[in-house]
Structures are given as structure tokens and as C-alpha cells.
Image (cartoon, grey):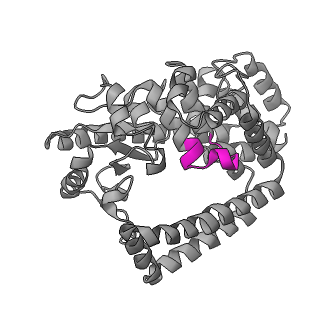
Amino acid sequence: MTNKELFYFIGNCIMLDEHPQFKAEILEKIKSDSIDWQKFVAICSNHLILPLIYLKFQSHKIIKYLPEELSEFLKNIYDLNRSRNNKILRQFEALTLTLNGIDVLPVFLKGAANLLDDLYSDIGERILGDIDFLVPEKDYLKSVKLLEKDGYSTHSESPIFEDIEKMKHYPRLTNPNFPADIEIHRLPVSEKYQTWFNPSIIDQEKKTVTRLSGCYVPSDNHKITHNFIHSQLTNGGHSSGIVSFRDFFDLYLLTKRSSVKLALPQIKCKHKAIAYFLLTGKALGLKKRIYNKSNFSTWILLRKHDLNLKSVAFYQIHRTIRLIINRIIIGYSTRVIKSFYSKGARHVLINCLTNPYWYRIHLQSYINFFHSNNNRTSGKNNK
């Protein structure tokens, strides 16, 4: 199988509940030994869906046909993730109890919200990176200090160049007694998207969950909006043409609760959202079931996505051009221009330029970038 064929094969694997007839094709490919299992695992690992793959293969009685070593590996990954997620649920309880002590009711976001809100069929289905939650801006730094007293601390001693009070979320905090790092948000998304997705808007529709009292999660419509912003705008999925299966699958599950057509009027970048919804349908073999009207942005996104799957050269060149434009040309120049009229921006810029560590971390980021370009695997193409 080519990289592109394997990608869409995986999409059908995680959608076996929707396409039970695909089981026969999977078994045929297993028997004919036409699947590169090492590449299959690499892609699923980069997309953080190995537990999901295990559950689909297990529920559709495919797991017993896999190579024994692979089936044991998938089960171990699932078992470890299920155990970790159970500990994370207890961490939710501890966080909520602590914050309730100062009359703060957190709004959990993204994967944390989905896990709390029983979006998944199994507690071990979703790999959770960290715990994001939103608190009222007036309680933002107070919540940080409280949790630091409760054993949380910053991930490293690296200097923070930005104004903490104006950051979207506080630098990541970790606690040796709990499995997941936490990010305490004063804003759900970057300030550039605040006019159409902000705490006030989330508050209008936030809901309680049966699993845990004293906290909230966004409405399903707002979860769809946040999924789009995080995947396509914050993580650059629309501009890069690289989207995670984990994002696709989260969106799919959310559309089983609420139509994207209800969320779309809230989204400012509608053409990009439509493109994302249609790409999700294609990647998961649902065609136009998530959204059925295409546009020019859809054609561009699908084309970039397929070129990334087909061509290593396109992936590397396109990724490098985006780095030069977004970080070097736009990123650095914007900082300099803002420093002329904003005292805060000028203070941050001076802090950066006078600190040797700032140069070291930027140099290292470029080294890492080009190293990953030169050592790209087929799986990382899709992350």
C-alpha cells in the first residue's frame, strides 16, 4: 500500500462501526500480508489513535487475526491508556475540589471536556495529552497560586518572555502525584479569535456533567467550534494540510450529538470550517455526510492533504515555506512593529533580545525543525 492508501485504510479501520462491511477487506489484506504493520503502527502512533484502533479491532473480532506480537502490543497500549485515564478522572476531581474551595468552577476544554462528558465509548479510547480548563479572568492568577500550593509547579525553569497576565493560558504545570500536566486558561483560544469565541460566549451555553459536580464543559456546538479552531487555526491544519486522526474522530463523535450546521453560524472563518468538515468526511470514509456543500477552500485543503500523503518533497518544501513566512517574515516583523506603539510589546521584545536563552531556544527550534524534515517518516506526515 502507498502512504495515501494506508492513510485512508486507517480511516476506515477506526470507522468500522459505520462501515462494518469493511471488516472483510481488512481480513483479506491481513491474509494476503499486504499491510506494512510497522508503518501502520507508526501512523496510528503519530495520530495518537492506537487505543482506538485496538478497541475497533477488538469489538469487530479482528484482533485475533493480527500478528500475535502486534495484538499484544495494541492491548498493552490500550490497557496503559485506560489506567492513565482513570487516574486523570481522579485528577479532575482533585482539581475541581481545590478550585471550588475559592468559589471557582472550572470549565474543562478539548479532550478533557470530552472525556468528562462521556463522548467516548470507552474510558481508554482517547489519549489525553494534558488537562485544559478555563477559569474567570479575575480568578486566573489566584487559581494558579492555589494549585501551586497544592503541589503543581511549572514544567521547567526556562524564562517566560511574555506577560503572564496577558497569555492565553499559564505556562504548563505538573504535579508528581498526578499523570497529566495542566494548562489554566484565562482565554479559550488566542486573542485573534476572541471576537467570536471567548469566555462570555462559552458561559452562555456551558453545561454540567453527570460524572462530576462543581465544574462545566462547553456545549457540543462550542466543542465543534473549538475543535475547528484548535485543529485548523491554532495548529495550522488548514494552511499545512496536515490534520490528526484524533481531531477527525473527535469531530465525528461531536457531530453525532450536534450538526456542524448549527455550529457554523458562530464561526467567522466559515470557508475554512467547511473545508475541514469535508476533509473529515473524506478521511473517515463518510464522503459528504458531515457537511455536503463544497467550496474553493475545500479543494485547496484536500489537494494539500493529498500532496502531503503522496510526496515527501512537497511536504518538506511546503513546511519550510510556511516556517519562513509565518515565523520569520510575519512573526518577527509583527513583534517589531507592535513594539513601536505598545509598551507591553516593547518590553517583551527587549526581554527577548537581551536574553541569551531566547537565542538558544530559537536556534534549537530551527535545528529540530530541519532535523525532522530530513528524517520524516510516513506517519509524521499525517500528525
In this image, 26 relative to 230: left or right? Answer: right
- How many numbered dots are placed on residues in this image? 0
Quadrant of res 49 = top right
Q: Residue at x 67, y 48 (%)?
A: 239
Q: Residue at x 56, y 23 (%)?
A: 260
Residue 265 against residue 21 in the figure, above or below: below
Q: Choose between 340 and 131: the one closer to the eye.
A: 340
Residue 312 against residue 257 in the figure, above or below: below
Q: Residue at x 68, y 66 (%)?
A: 324
In this image, 256 relative to 209: left or right? Answer: right
Q: For the N terminus, which image quadrant?
A: top right
Residue 293: where, in percent of width, then height? 71, 22
Q: Choose between 52 and 233: the one closer to the eye.
A: 233
Residue 137 against residue 358 in the figure, above or below: above
Look at the image and tell me whether residue 41 can be seen.
yes
Q: Is residue 240 magenta?
A: yes
Q: Residue at x 58, y 37 (%)?
A: 269
Outermost residue to the top: 21
Residue 372: where, in percent of width, then height? 68, 63
Residue 226: where, in percent of width, then height? 48, 37
In this image, 14 relative to 159: left or right? Answer: right
Residue 331: where, in percent of width, then height? 57, 65
Look at the image and tell me whether residue 77 can be seen.
no
Q: Choose between 49 and 337: the one closer to the eye.
A: 337
Q: Is residue 130 magenta?
A: no
Range drawn in magenta: 231-244
